[in-house]
Amino acid sequence: MGPLPQFYADMFGWEEKATAVIRAWQSLPPGDRARCAIYAENYGRCAAIDFYGRRHGLPPCIGKHNSYWTWGTRGHTGELIIILGTDLGDKREQFASVEIAGQVPANPYCMPYENNLRVYICRGLKKPLRAIWPSLKMYI
């Protein structure tokens, strides 16, 4: 799909992804940061956020993919979530409010579907996060 096989391509773009999420998180008032979850669709995105975000005070990422799903919601309710990636449409259906907070710049060496990801600040998940968590599980 890209200039590198996936095994190598998945090692590129981590810092850019985390930086975009860090900027969104830092844009929140301190009270919002304290209750904000950070969510990503796959373990690579989650790991990038965890690796680079730790030194900026980000909470551990939550996600639906492999071990990240088994670690659960980490006590988050869904009232405020920063989400890395996926489409805007489904978020507008699931949350009371959705704001595009940034975009990850393209990296020529990562997988094409990992480029130009958006970062969203989503508020007011319409169903409790704990209730929908079982349906999010994705093991591959």
Image: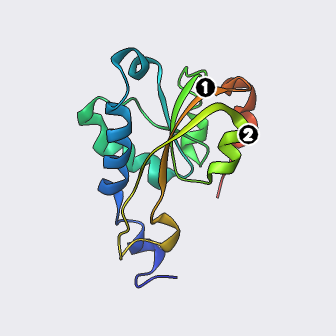
**Farthest residue, direction top:** 31
At which x and y percent is residue 90?
70, 46
Amino acid at dot 2: Glu
Where's the C terminus, which quadrant?
Answer: bottom right
Residue 110 pos. (x, y %) = 40, 71
Q: Is residue 48 above or below residue 130?
A: below
Q: Nearer the viewer, residue 111 or 124?
A: 124
User: At 48% from the left edge and 64% from the top edge, which residue is drawn?
Assistant: 114
Residue at the image position 32 percent from the left and 44 percent from the top = 51
Residue most extreme to the left: 55
Q: Which mark is residue 93?
A: 2
| Above or below, 48 relative to 107 | above
- Image quarter for residue 31? top left
Rendered image quadrant of residue 32: top left
In the rendered image, which residue does mark 1 sit on?
78
Q: Amino acid at mark 1?
A: Gly
- Report the residue at 47% width, 25% height from top: 36
Work out whether residue 87 or residue 5 is closer to the camera in this orientation and state it: 87
Position of residue 13 in the picture relative to residue 70 (left or right): left
How far from the left and from the top, in percent, is residue 63? 56, 41
Looking at the rendered structure, the secondary structure element under dot 1 is loop
Crowding around mark 1 (Cα neighbors within 10 Å: few <14, some 14 to 19, many 20+) is many
140 or 112, which is in the foreground? 112
Is residue 137 shown to the viewer in this render?
no
